[in-house]
C-alpha cells in the first residue's frame, strides 16, 4: 500500500511541476525574460514554432524572445496565454498537449494574432522537469496542428 501511495504522490507532484513549467512560459515571454524562457528547456532542447526556423539550444530559444518579431509584439502590448495541458507521464519522460493564444493590443481592445496547438516533450533532470521539445503549429485547418493535440 505504501508504494502505491508514494507512486501516486510522485505522479501528482510531477504533473504539478509540469503544469507550473508550462504556465510560466507566457509570463516569462511577455516580460521579455529571454534567459528564463530558455532555461525552461534542456540545453539541447528544441522549440519548433510554425512559420519560423527551428530553435535548438538555449541561445537560439532566447533569440526568439529578443528577436524583432517578439520585440515588436511586446512594444505593441501582448499576452501569451496557454490552456491547461493534458499531461501523459512515462517515468522520467512526459508529454503534454495544449492550446496557446497570442493576444496583441489593437486600438482599445485585443486581437488574437496566433492560435496554435502545442505538444511539449519533457524530461526529468537534476534541476527538475525541462522541455526537450515543443512543437507549436497554427490551428488553421491543417492536419499537422490537429495531430499535435491528438493522443
Image: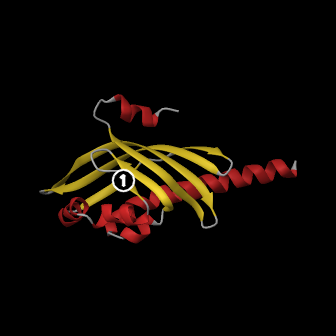
Give the left or right position of residue 20, taking residue 145 as reference: right
Image point (36%, 65%), residue name: 62
Of all residues shown, which one is farthest toward the left? 107
Please give the count of numbered marks on the rendered protein.
1
Residue sitting nearer the eye, 20 or 47: 47
Image point (28%, 67%), residue name: 66
Location of residue 139 by image quarter = top left
Q: Is residue 116 above or below residue 46?
A: above
Residue sitting nearer the eye, 66 or 83: 66
Q: Is residue 84 above or below residue 141?
A: below
- Which secondary structure lies at badge 1? strand
Residue sitting nearer the eye, 77 or 46: 46
Image point (69%, 48%), residue name: 91
Give the left or right position of residue 128, taking residue 57 as reference: right
Give the left or right position of residue 101, taking residue 108 as reference: right
> Which color mode does the image show?
secondary structure
Of all residues shown, which one is farthest toward the right? 1
Coordinates of residue 54 in the picture (x, y in percent) = 35, 51
Coordinates of residue 43 in the picture (x, y in percent) = 50, 63
Residue corresponding to mark 1: 81
Could you classify mark 1 by the number of other residues whose Cα lies within 10 Å: few (under 14), some (14-19), or many (20 or more)?
some
Coordinates of residue 67 in the picture (x, y in percent) = 25, 64
Coordinates of residue 11 in the picture (x, y in percent) = 68, 50
Amino acid at each position: 500500500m505504501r508504494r502505491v501511495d508514494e507512486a501516486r504522490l510522485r505522479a501528482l507532484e510531477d504533473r504539478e511541476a509540469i503544469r507550473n513549467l508550462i504556465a510560466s512560459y507566457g509570463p516569462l515571454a511577455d516580460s521579455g525574460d529571454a534567459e528564463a524562457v530558455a532555461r525552461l528547456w534542456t540545453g539541447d532542447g528544441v522549440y519548433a514554432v510554425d512559420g519560423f526556423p527551428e530553435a535548438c539550444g538555449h541561445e537560439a530559444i532566447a533569440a526568439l524572445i529578443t528577436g524583432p518579431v517578439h520585440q515588436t509584439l511586446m512594444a505593441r502590448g501582448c499576452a501569451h496565454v496557454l490552456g491547461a495541458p493534458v499531461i501523459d507521464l512515462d517515468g522520467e519522460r512526459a508529454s503534454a498537449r495544449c492550446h496557446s493564444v497570442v493576444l496583441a493590443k489593437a486600438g482599445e481592445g485585443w486581437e488574437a494574432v496566433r492560435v496554435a496547438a502545442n505538444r511539449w516533450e519533457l524530461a526529468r533532470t537534476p534541476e527538475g522537469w525541462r522541455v526537450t521539445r515543443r512543437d507549436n503549429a497554427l490551428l488553421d485547418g491543417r492536419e499537422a496542428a490537429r495531430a499535435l493535440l491528438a493522443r
